[in-house]
Image (tube, rainbow, N blue to C red):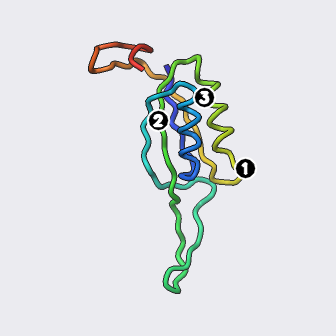
Amino acid sequence: MKKMEIIIRPSMFDKVKNVLSEMGIHGLNYVEIKGFGRQRGHTEVYRGTTMQVDCLPKTKLEVVLPDEMVENVLNAVVSMARTGQVGDGKIFISDVQDAIRIRTGERGDEAL
């Protein structure tokens, strides 16, 4: 099992969520976050004062899936979320030792 942490633009959330659902992934967690990478923010004018905004809004999705689905999910997410501009996001993939469904006690892939 692998855990994918997907950090994308908030405007891409619905597209990515829909493609994951179409691929048979019915469980995910997401949270609205702020951060920066190479984009390093931007400047805004607020009430006549120029301000540097360092941390930009992003959406972070977490999905746990079987090893055999990783490449297909990765390709689908990248194709949905890519604009070609700085700030499109990142995907981190890590190993998951085990998963347990609390309600039934199922473990491993059956718990997903």
Residue type of the residue flagged with mark 2:
Glu
Position above or below: 106 against 76:
above
Instruction: Tell me the residue that label 2 is attached to.
Output: 62
Residue sitting at x 59%, y 60%: 40
Position above or below: 98 against 5:
above
**Badge 2 or badge 3: first in the primary sequence:** 2
Marks 2 and 1 in Cβ contact (< 8 Å): no
**Badge 3 or badge 1: first in the primary sequence:** 3
- Tell me where residue 93 sits by quadrant: top right
Residue type of the residue flagged with mark 1:
Gly
The residue nearer to you, when weighing 103 against 87, is 103
As drawn, the label of residue 110 is none
- Give the CA distance from mark 2 to mark 3: 12 Å
Rendered location of residue 106, percent (x, y): 34, 13
Residue type of the residue flagged with mark 3:
Val
As drawn, the label of residue 84 is 1
Rendered location of residue 20, percent (x, y): 55, 32
SS label for mark 1: loop
